[in-house]
Image: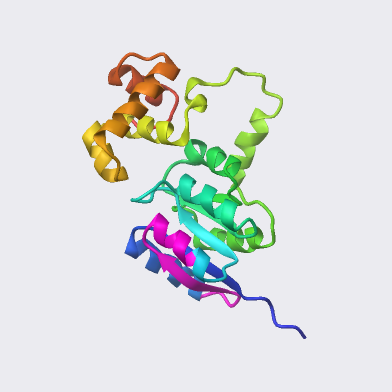
Amino acid sequence: MTAPRVLRVLIADDHAIVREGLKQILADTGDIIVAGDAGSGLDAIKMARAGEFDVLLLDISMPDRSGIEVLKQVRQEFPKLAVLMLSMHREDQYAIRSLKAGASGYLNKQSAPDELVTAIRQVAQGRKYISPALAQQLADQIGDDRAVAPHETLSDREYQTLTMIASGKTVSEIATELVLSVKTISMYRSRLLQKMKLRHNAELTHYAIKNNLVQE
């Protein structure tokens, strides 16, 4: 009888406690091993180049570059590597963006451990994984001729800037967190205000709360 194939997983998350927690969950399986872990987007890309992995568990909020940017580069260099995005953000904020960028699935970090294991096995088989809640949301959009919402026209960085400003962070705080210059974040802010036809942060925050992009 042929032994089941062991899946090699690379974990990329900037929080050591999260990485250790994921390792602990996967240690209880017989067919999944954590073959590497990285604390930044750049390290994740370097490790993907150096080793052979079946699945990349990628946090969407990385300190050096966004998870979406890492995802796009990984998909370009390693098209066969399944990427499962992990996030504390609600699915409706980043899931569709992640899937459009090439992710094999999207999972909230608050999901149950057995759901994580199921998702890894599923994406490793070349299939997509989304939660029942997200599946329902996507189903609701099928055949929906609604106009595209203003925030859906934003780039990934502009959208990230929008949600962070709406959460009460200053341009300087955002620049520090994303390891970008204040000038760059100010440029993203100007672009998104122009695209969304908003005048200032107060209108931006009101829009974000009204459209459930951030928690009140």
Quadrant containing the C terminus in the rendered view: top left
Q: Residue at x 51, y 36 (%)?
A: 92
Q: Is residue 202 above or below residue 136?
A: above
Look at the image and give the residue range highlighted in magenta: 28-47
Where residue 157 appears, as percent x and y from the top left, is 41, 36
Q: Is residue 212 among the parts visible in the rendering?
A: yes
- In-front residue for pair 2/77: 77
Q: Is residue 33 above or below residue 193?
A: below
Q: Is residue 33 above or below residue 178?
A: below
Say left or right for 107 vs 192: right
Dividing the picture into quadrants, the one containing residue 163 is top left
Quadrant containing the N terminus in the rendered view: bottom right
Say left or right for 172 vs 19: left
Is residue 30 covered in magenta? yes
Where residue 171 appears, as percent x and y from the top left, is 25, 32
Colour scheme of this structure image? rainbow
Where residue 58 appears, as percent x and y from the top left, is 47, 55
Q: Residue at x 57, y 21 (%)?
A: 148
Dividing the picture into quadrants, the one containing residue 188 is top left
- In-front residue for pair 121/131: 121
Where residue 165 appears, as percent x and y from the top left, is 30, 30
Q: Is residue 96 above or below residue 33?
A: above
Say left or right for 164 vs 118: left
- In the picture as drawn, the residue positioned furthest to the right comes out as 1
Q: Is residue 167 among the parts visible in the rendering?
A: no
Is residue 35 covered in magenta? yes
Q: Residue at x 39, y 23 (%)?
A: 191
- In-front residue for pair 47/128: 47
Say left or right for 4 vs 114: right
Q: How many marks?
A: 0
- In the picture as drawn, the residue positioned furthest to the bottom comes out as 1
